[in-house]
Image: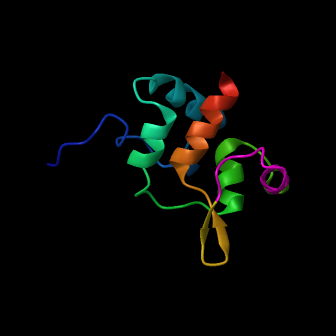
Amino acid sequence: MLATSHHSATTRPSSLSACSRVFMLRQTTCMTSTDLAVADRTRPVLTTKQAAEYVGLKPHTLQVMKWEAAGPVVSKQGRLNVHYPADLDAWLRERLT
């Protein structure tokens, strides 16, 4: 069996409630948000709809926040806007403090 890091054993984002994700974020305080974002860029990306569900917002709200530069980091893959779960986690962590 391969060795795993402390945050690789988490469940899939779609199976977690917003409260569970916030609790998990509070448990990962040993790494900075930048460290987590860089370390976790290998996971699958989320569409805007999936990202909105992940953070507990409506897709349109997430789009408006993107236009106002107030939302989480958005990456491009071709013509699609995508979100890395690590970026969403870092953004949620910033909103909690």
Residue occupying the point 78% across, 54% down? 66
Spot occupied by residue 12 in the image (x, y as percentages of width and height): 48, 49
Is 96 situated left or right of 10 in this image? right
Label count reads 0
Query: Residue 88, how many percent across, how many down?
Result: 60, 45
Between residues 35 and 19, which one lies in front from this camera angle? 35
- Side of 96 relative to 23 (left or right): right
Q: Which residues are drawn in magenta?
A: 62-74
Residue 70 sits inside the magenta stretch: yes
| Image-quadrant location for residue 95 | top right
- Residue 36 horizontal side relative to residue 96, left or right: left
Tell me what residue is drawn at x 70 percent, y 60 percent.
48
Residue sitting at x 57%, y 35% = 21
Q: Which quadrant holds the C terminus?
A: top right
| Left or right placement of residue 12 versus residue 51 in this view | left
Q: Nearer the viewer, residue 49 or 74?
A: 74
- For image coordinates 85% across by 53% down, the residue present is 64
Quadrant housing residue 3: top left
> Percent from the top left, x then y, of residue 59?
79, 56
Which residue sits furthest left?
1
Q: Does the magenta-highlighted stretch encompass residue 40? A: no
Tell me how the rendering is colored: rainbow
Residue that extends furthest to the bottom in the rendered view of this protein? 78
Residue 45 screen position, x and y as percent: 53, 61
